[in-house]
Amino acid sequence: MAVNLQLVPAAAGKRLGAAVIDWLPPLAVLVLTLTIGFAGITRTRNGQYITYDTASLVLFGGIGLGLTLVYLFVVMGIEARTGKTPGNLLMGIRSADNDGYAPGAGAVFLRGLITGAGVLLALLAAVLVVVFKWFAPALFILAPLFLAGAAWAVLVVVSNLWDKNSGLRGWHDKPAKALVFDVKAGRDPITTGGIQGPYSFAPMDLPPVQQVLSPVAGVPAASPPVQTAAPRVLTPPSQTSPSQTMPYTAPGSFAPPSPTPAPPPAAAPAAASETAGGSVPVQGGHVDDDVERTQVRPRGGPVPVAVLRIRLDDGRDFQLDRSVLVGRNPVGQAGEQHAQLLAVDDPGRSISKTHLHLLTDGAGIWVTDRNSTNGSAVTTPNGARTPLAPGVPTFVTPGSSVHFGDRTFYLGQA
């Protein structure tokens, strides 16, 4: 997790470095196969006619084009769901949509189409050269077009340099409504709650903690009032009711015995009320010194039960039942028909149909990853992030965040 929790736009240099890393494999394959294909073209003269054998060009060109398309579709699919490409990973940047989540296939395709428009025109020209058999001037036609296409692609990638909004978007980002962030210098919005920020760093409102006053010995201002009217009076055993508790007397080896005046008959009721009502400070001592005295627990009042709630990274808040299934369209297995079903929107389809199973406990929840495709993780209040093993329940305490796919929820108490 980055130390800086702010969003940091990716610099033009990192954008260009990531693009070069992503382009090198397909370009190398395409150039190599086309070169072999063109070198294998044979020319045969038959009278006034010249025949070109382009079988090698079709074979190797088709192989190169097929491998390039497969590579592009795989990389685009990964970027659409996670914002990652090989270049993005190495340069520490992520592409995202306008809300800070996974960009989606449409935005990735549109950005790639604008960036590679020049190269696509050069490829179209190469097809025309083969169709019309313009092999003699092919080098003079294709070389300038490929160079112009490469220059256009570089210019588009670094075009955020001229963006007036702090270099946030390039020319290809604006129509695709996409953003690119530096996740090494700042946080990754895709995994931490989007543009609005992670709720794991801004927890939901919880009930205030009840402070307990504990006076410090020797500080008069913090000491409670001391009873000075008369020494504490103990009730004789014969007058003690079942609801009253006798004070504990320390053994003689630890505390020397001190004489206790005989209780007058009229003081017995007062002493009984003191014993049943709670601790009474001893004259001349500190309130915390009377720690050995047994307290009477109040009866009949309801025991408060903590109510667990989760807040999704889109702001929605839910109170949890005993058993909860979370996913894109969760469905319970056998024996789970009575589970609470919590469907989470996921345009990037990073969440499995039934991604998580939550089982509430008085002190937290047991979270089980249901063998999801993209996995899950837990971030504790101290910032430690731990991946969840599929099928293994993990106990999560309030104040933690659970990440599943590209989404996150915060666990708290109401």
Image (cartoon, grey):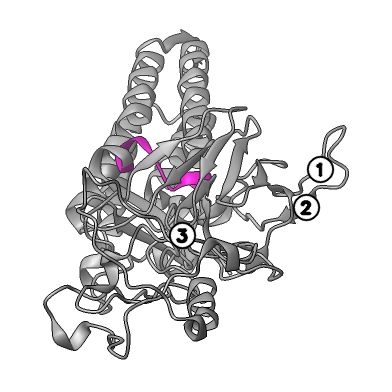
Of residues 86 and 324, which is closer to you in this image? 324
Label 3, label 2: how many angstroms apart (C-alpha)? 48 Å
Q: Residue at x 59, y 47 (%)?
A: 365
Q: Which residue is mark 2?
A: 341
Q: Label 1: few (<14), some or many (≥20) within 10 Å?
A: some
- Going from N to C along the chain, the mark reached first, 3 or 1, is 3
Of residues 219 and 293, which is closer to you in this image? 293
Question: Residue 331, which numbered label?
Answer: 1
Q: Residue at x 53, y 45 (%)?
A: 81
Label 3, label 1: how many angstroms apart (C-alpha)? 53 Å
* Residue bounds of the magenta highlight: 80-88
x and y percentages locating residue 192 in the rendered image:
42, 57
Circles 3 and 2 in contact, beta carbons < 8 Å: no
Magenta region, main secondary structure? helix
Q: Which residue is mark 3?
A: 294
- The answer to whether residue 144 is seen in the rendering is no
User: Any magenta on residue 84?
Assistant: yes
Of residues 299 and 8, which is closer to you in this image? 299
Q: Residue at x 39, y 54 (%)?
A: 95
The image quarter containing residue 367 is top right
- Going from N to C along the chain, the mark reached first, 3 or 2, is 3
Q: Amino acid at mark 1?
A: Val
Circles 2 and 1 in contact, beta carbons < 8 Å: yes
Q: Quadrant of the C terminus?
A: bottom right
